[in-house]
């Protein structure tokens, strides 16, 4: 019984250090082209992602320090198909991060 407890404690310590992101962040292309002048990148994320989540995601996945994060919520557009049928796209959040240009060299293809 004691061995099982020790093994469980070691396993929980190990698994607490692994970061599994459960969110999608897509770079908006026009911001990447303007990056050398502005030092800002824009991402499209889901509405339930916060600023601290974005900082943690960038640090753990890309190893990039993010000093500043700005976010804004964008409503989904209403699209029409034909004359009567209309539907609404999903809402999303725009995240604007400011980073050092030397950190982003590894992100280029």
Image: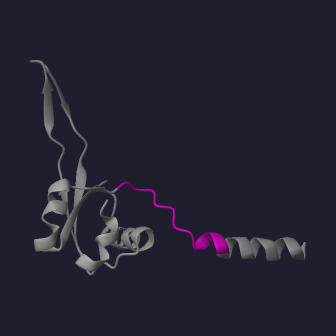
Is residue 32 covered in magenta? no
Picture coordinates of residue 81, whole percent (x, y) = 15, 22
Residue at 74% across, 76% down: 9
Picture coordinates of residue 45, whole percent (x, y) = 30, 56
Q: Measured along the vertical axis of the image, is residue 42 above or below residue 7?
A: above
Quadrant position of residue 48: bottom left
Give the dominant element type of the magenta stretch: helix, strand or loop: loop
Picture coordinates of residue 51, whole percent (x, y) = 30, 70
Q: Quadrant of the N terminus?
A: bottom right
Residue at 76% across, 71% down: 8
Viewer-closest of 78 and 59: 59
Q: How many marks?
A: 0
Q: Quadrant of the C terminus?
A: bottom left
Q: Measured along the vertical axis of the image, is residue 10 above or below residue 20?
A: below
Colour scheme of this structure image? one colour
Residue range (magenta): 14-24
Picture coordinates of residue 20, whole percent (x, y) = 51, 62
Residue at 21% across, 55% down: 28
Relative side of 80 to 101, left or right: left
Q: Measured along the vertical axis of the image, is residue 16 above or below residue 67?
A: above
Residue at 35% across, 75% down: 64
């Amino acid at each position: 019984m004691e061995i099982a407890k020790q093994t469980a404690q070691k396993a929980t310590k190990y698994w607490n250090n692994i970061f599994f992101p459960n969110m999608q962040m897509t770079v908006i292309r026009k911001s990447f082209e303007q990056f050398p002048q502005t030092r800002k990148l824009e991402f499209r994320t889901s509405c339930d992602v916060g600023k601290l989540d974005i900082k943690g995601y960038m640090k753990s996945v890309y190893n990039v320090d993010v000093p500043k994060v700005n976010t804004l919520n964008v409503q989904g557009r209403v699209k029409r198909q034909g004359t009567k049928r209309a539907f609404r796209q999903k809402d999303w959040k725009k995240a604007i991060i400011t980073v050092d240009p030397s950190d982003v060299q590894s992100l280029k293809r």
